[in-house]
């Protein structure tokens, strides 16, 4: 009898263990058509690798192009990278045509060497930051930790130098600074490196303004219909090279680029991705305008100023967040949102917050609600008392961190809806339903990427 009891106990233990092991799941590798619509998967000048690993709830895409492989860290970033290809083609053509070609050739002849390409690295690779947006849904979050602030500061410096803390963008005297400071050429003293090329140096930024580098760059971006602060390393480098060429040649980069015609003239109509209003203002004007917008909604001027100078937001994304927040008109919670936004570590994280607000704004009756944070995610209580949790992710897998996140006491209420930009696994859907959540997958919002339709997605059809 004792033997049979022991056998039964062991069987129950094994059953419980098996059940527990099936409670969570790893992030899958999906087929690209499960996530995005066909036009984003291939075209005359690109092809997306069919296997897409999910990292931090976002698809990690690899695009094969004539310019080399390009990474995209979400479905939204994939659509942006594809939309940037015509601009890259136009810049490549311009570098071999007209005023740009003349200026580049003259510069190469003057220095006795070809223009040196900048070696770029993704910011997240350098700083070792989490991939995707997993940290938004983690169990622990300290938005004002010293580590977060130091990484934010470091990211700012690295973005200023296009991804490499030891190199600066191409410019006058480029040939004298091929090597990073730890390995300078024997004949060159480190102190003689270009004065504007020292990482994190305020003089460098003022020098760029004086040389009209930024205005030339923005003028080309406006013609092409792209974000001048794009994190696309290939586009970024081409804009740098031609902006400096215009400075050296003393001509208008925007006018010269427009004269190329062909692809450049059609880019704006094809992409529709850029808020042209942003490029009609200087960065200083935008900062002043956005500061006024935010101070009308937020009571903490320090949080406003911090957001306008820190984090992974570009001018376009900052403006978009301010405009969407203005549309939502929250009764409370604005300060906490800006504190959170100031600690973002890159474009994917910044876009997550902007898209979260857009998901809320798309819901009927949401305007005038209360904004709050749950760890690093944001929630919204509508005037009618409904709790909205926007999750603009590509694919939600159920794991231990996510379970702890959804078990927070402040998320335990009756009327609540989770808005998922992409899709959730069957296990995640069951777990959310068990916790009383209504689920809206493929939830629409302004500017949402071209996700595959729900009928094309089979959660069991992972690679």
Image (tube, helix red, strand yellow):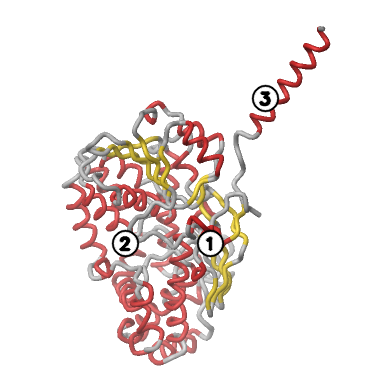
For the point 30% across and 51% down, which residue is it? 362
> Which numbered circle lies on residue 16?
3
Q: Residue at point 38% right, 35% down?
A: 374
Q: Is residue 153 above or below residue 263?
A: above
Callout 3: SS? helix
State yes or no: discs 1 and 2 in contact (Cβ < 8 Å): no
Of 21 and 141, the residue lying toward us? 21
Tell me the tag on residue 316. Answer: 2
**Which of pointers 1 and 2 indicates the residue nearer the eye?**
2
Q: Earlier in the sequence, mark 3 or mark 1?
A: 3
Q: Where, by quadrant of the figure, is residue 368 drawn?
A: top left
Residue 179 in view here: yes
Give how far across and how far down residue 83 sits, in percent: 43, 71
Task: Choose top left, top right, bottom left or bottom right for residue 257.
Answer: bottom left
Q: Which residue is mark 1?
A: 121
Looking at this view, is 293 or 193 the one in front? 293
């Amino acid at each position: 009898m004792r033997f049979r009891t022991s056998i039964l106990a062991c069987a129950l233990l094994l059953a419980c263990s098996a059940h527990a092991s099936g409670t969570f799941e790893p992030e899958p590798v999906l087929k690209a058509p499960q996530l995005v619509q066909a036009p984003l998967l291939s075209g005359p000048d690109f092809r997306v690798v069919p296997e897409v690993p999910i990292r931090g709830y976002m698809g990690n895409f690899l695009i094969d192009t004539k310019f080399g492989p390009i990474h995209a860290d979400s479905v939204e970033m994939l659509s942006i990278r594809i939309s940037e290809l015509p601009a890259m083609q136009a810049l490549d053509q311009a570098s071999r045509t007209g005023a740009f070609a003349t200026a580049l050739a003259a510069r190469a002849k003057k220095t006795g060497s070809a223009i040196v390409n900048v070696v770029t690295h993704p910011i997240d690779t350098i700083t070792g930051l989490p991939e995707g947006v997993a940290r938004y849904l983690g169990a622990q979050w300290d938005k004002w930790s010293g580590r977060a602030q130091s990484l934010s500061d470091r990211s700012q410096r690295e973005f200023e130098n296009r991804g490499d803390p030891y190199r600066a963008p191409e410019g006058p005297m480029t040939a004298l600074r091929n090597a990073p400071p730890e390995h300078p050429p024997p004949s060159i003293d480190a102190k003689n490196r270009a004065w504007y090329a020292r990482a994190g140096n305020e003089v460098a930024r003022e020098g760029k303004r004086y040389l009209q580098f930024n205005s030339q760059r923005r003028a080309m971006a406006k013609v092409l219909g792209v974000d001048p602060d794009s994190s696309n390393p290939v586009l970024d480098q081409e804009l740098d090279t031609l902006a400096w060429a215009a400075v050296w040649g003393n001509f208008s980069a925007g006018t010269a680029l427009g004269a190329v015609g062909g692809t450049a003239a059609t880019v704006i109509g094809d992409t529709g991705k850029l808020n042209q209003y942003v490029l009609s203002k200087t960065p200083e004007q935008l900062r002043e305008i956005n500061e006024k917008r935010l101070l009308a909604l937020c009571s903490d001027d320090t949080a406003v100023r911090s957001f306008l100078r820190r984090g992974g937001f570009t001018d376009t994304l900052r403006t978009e967040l301010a405009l969407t927040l203005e549309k939502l008109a929250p009764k409370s919670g604005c300060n906490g949102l800006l504190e959170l936004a100031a600690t973002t570590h890159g474009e994917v994280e910044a876009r997550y917050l902007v898209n979260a607000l857009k998901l809320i704004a798309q819901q009927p009756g949401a305007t005038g609600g209360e904004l709050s944070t749950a760890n690093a995610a944001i929630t919204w209580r509508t005037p009618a008392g409904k709790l909205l949790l926007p999750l603009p992710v590509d694919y939600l897998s159920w794991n231990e961190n996510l379970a702890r996140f959804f078990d927070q006491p402040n998320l335990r209420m009756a009327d609540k809806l989770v808005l998922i930009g992409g899709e959730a696994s069957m296990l995640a859907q069951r777990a959310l339903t068990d916790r009383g959540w209504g689920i809206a997958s493929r939830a629409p919002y302004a500017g949402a990427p071209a996700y595959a339709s729900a009928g094309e997605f089979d959660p069991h059809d992972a690679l």
